[in-house]
Amino acid sequence: MKQITGLIFTSFAILFLCFSCQKAPFPAIPEVPQHVLDKDIKIDKLIQKSLERLHLLTQSTSDSSLVPRGWDTENQKLILDKAHVWTSGFYPASLWMAYDLSQDSSWEEQARRYTYTLAEQIYAYQTHDLGFMIYNSLGKGYALTGDSTLRMLCLMAADELMKLFDVNKKAIKTAPRAKENGLNFIIDNLINLELLHFAYEEGGETRFQEAIQHHLTFCLNEFLKKDHSNATYVVHQLSFEEGQEEPIVLAGQGAGQYSKWSRGQAWGIYGFSQRYLAVRESPDTTLLSKEIAQKCLHAAKALADQWILNAPSDGIPYWDFEAQMIPHEPKDASAACVAACGMLMLYESLPPEEGKRYYSYAENIIKALSSDIYFLQTTEIPFILNHSTLSVPHEIDIDGPQTMADYYWLEALWRYKNMEMKEEVKPHIP
């Protein structure tokens, strides 16, 4: 009897310890009320408010060798990174975007402070993130100013990125690290193709065009998956071990191997839409085959449809669509910003009647993010948006402000404003 009693006591003790070690449920973030989503967007006012908040961040930074990434809630201070971190381009990219939106030269002066800080990273570390780091910032600067130095730096970065093109798999691999085995590929690299597109258009070298076409084919064949309901989604990371033809799917920053990591879905919507739109707008008919271009458009639509079907009513996703404790999971406003940009590009790629649902949904996301739930009000935290999540599995920047989110937010406003200025483009939305 004593043995039984002791066994029962031990079992309860183990259960108690298991439950006590579990993390407390994450506080649920309320969805934006419908009456807020029903309001019209005052785009110029929203841009002004956003730039006022970005100005708070410029006042909080002085050392251009360190780049703001997020906010340390516990210590109430900026998280600053050295420029080799992959997110380092988003803050100067925001400054260039602010210059484009306002035509105020003070923003250009601020952006240029980081030009050479970023330029030093082209050769300092071999990284697959050069598109994020260099093109979003210096490429935007070149487009706005025609500065030949910025052009040269972007072309140098494209050359470096090409060194990660694997000739066997015909795709851009992740930068090799000692802890990784085999060849690794991530969906994020879809966005870095814009840097190679720039290099091809500026120099005409076919190696860039061929790399774009090959990498897109790889993404379409390997990253796109179907779930039990036949809906399309993307996985985050693939690894090929030596001698293997079939990749191993890795969870990466998602909740599991085959879960729908929200920013990964957003990269897919954005990247495939961007590649199709770039082909449609280019006079160079050899940039991409019609077959691959159509597959990109189809993939972007399928991923956007999956987002619309599965996201919360306000369009702002949890960090993973299949996170286990929804609604007690962190959300990711950065993913919503990326998806909104992608859906606006998708609208531009389609006939108005077919594309207006994506335009309308992007509007929905912008309205939600401009609400008090996401748009920061306090001057103590110098960012635009709250409730973004960099990586739950790696416990990095969970549920807070981010320069990445702020950049794609400004890009979404820029895209929306440019469409507003073209009356023939905007569809009638009942």
Image (cartoon, grey):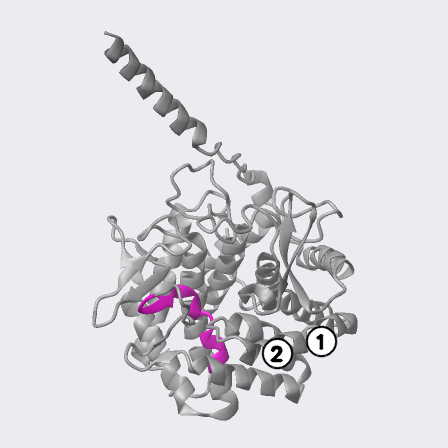
Q: State the residue position of label 1.
A: 112
Q: Is residue 57 depicted above or below 145 in this figure?
A: above
Residue shown at the point (40%, 71%) measured from the top left: 176
Q: Nearer the viewer, residue 343 or 192?
A: 192
Q: Position of residue 91 (x, y in %)?
A: 64, 65
Looking at this view, name the residue that lies furthest to the front.
Answer: 2
Q: State the residue position of label 2.
A: 120
Residue 276: tell me if it is visible. yes
Position of 92 compared to 391: left or right? Answer: right
Q: Amino acid at mark 2?
A: Glu
Q: Quadrant of the N terminus?
A: top left
Position of 378 compared to 209: left or right? Answer: right
Residue 88 lies in quadrant = bottom right
Q: Classify mark 2: helix, strand or loop.
A: loop
Specify the label residue 255 is tagged with: none
In space, the residues marked 2 and 1 are separated at their CA atoms by 14 Å
Q: Is residue 202 depicted above or below 56 in this figure?
A: below
